[in-house]
Image (spheres, rainbow, N blue to C red):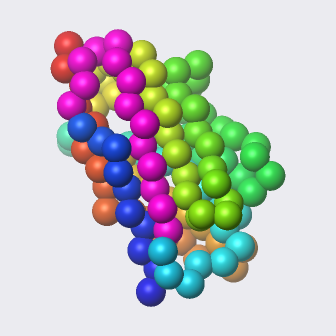
Amino acid sequence: QVQLAESGGGLVQAGGSLRLSCAASGSIFSIVVMGWYRQAPGKQRDLVASIGSSGGTNYADSVKGRFTISRDNAKNTVFLQMSRLNAEDTGVYYCNMQTITAQLYWGQGTQVTVSS
């Protein structure tokens, strides 16, 4: 059984930084895309950033220049370095991994709260 475990969320002041991590456990192979999504209160879950197996990245416009996504393929882990956080970054952050066979896995989410 595959499980994704996120960590690194918490409460931070505006302008601060946080680093999220998400590690996959279980029998998961050939992860093509790893990503982070954010769900603010009362809103839909939106893509924040994604990274392909060769390192290509994609960011939501609202986080470009502030967030950096990276991955450790050997450890099936994806990271999200978040800097210059603001109140609009508040939400539950979910990691997501998709395999070459189109299997999709989600983490349980980690809360990020930015106080202004």
Residue 66 vertical placement versus 50 (above, below): above
Question: Which residue: 66% across, 78% down?
Answer: 29
Query: Looking at the rendering, which quadrant does residue 33 occupy?
Result: bottom right
Residue placed most toward the observer, 84 or 42: 84
Residue that appears at 71% across and 52% down: 52
Q: Quadrant of residue 6?
A: bottom left
Based on the picture, tell me whether residue 45 belongs to the magenta stretch: no
Q: Does the rendering let one see residue 44? A: no
Residue 71 is situated, as x and y percent measured from the top left of the image, at 63, 50
Image quarter where the C terminus lies is: top left
Question: Which residue range is magenta in the image?
Answer: 11-24
- Can you name the residue that lies furthest to the right here? 54
Q: Residue at 59%, 64% (x, y): give it.
A: 76
Dominant SS of magenta comes to: strand
Which quadrant holds the N terminus?
A: bottom left
How many marks do you count on the picture? 0
Image coordinates of residue 43 in percent, x first then y, are: 28, 42
x, y percent for residue 8: 34, 44
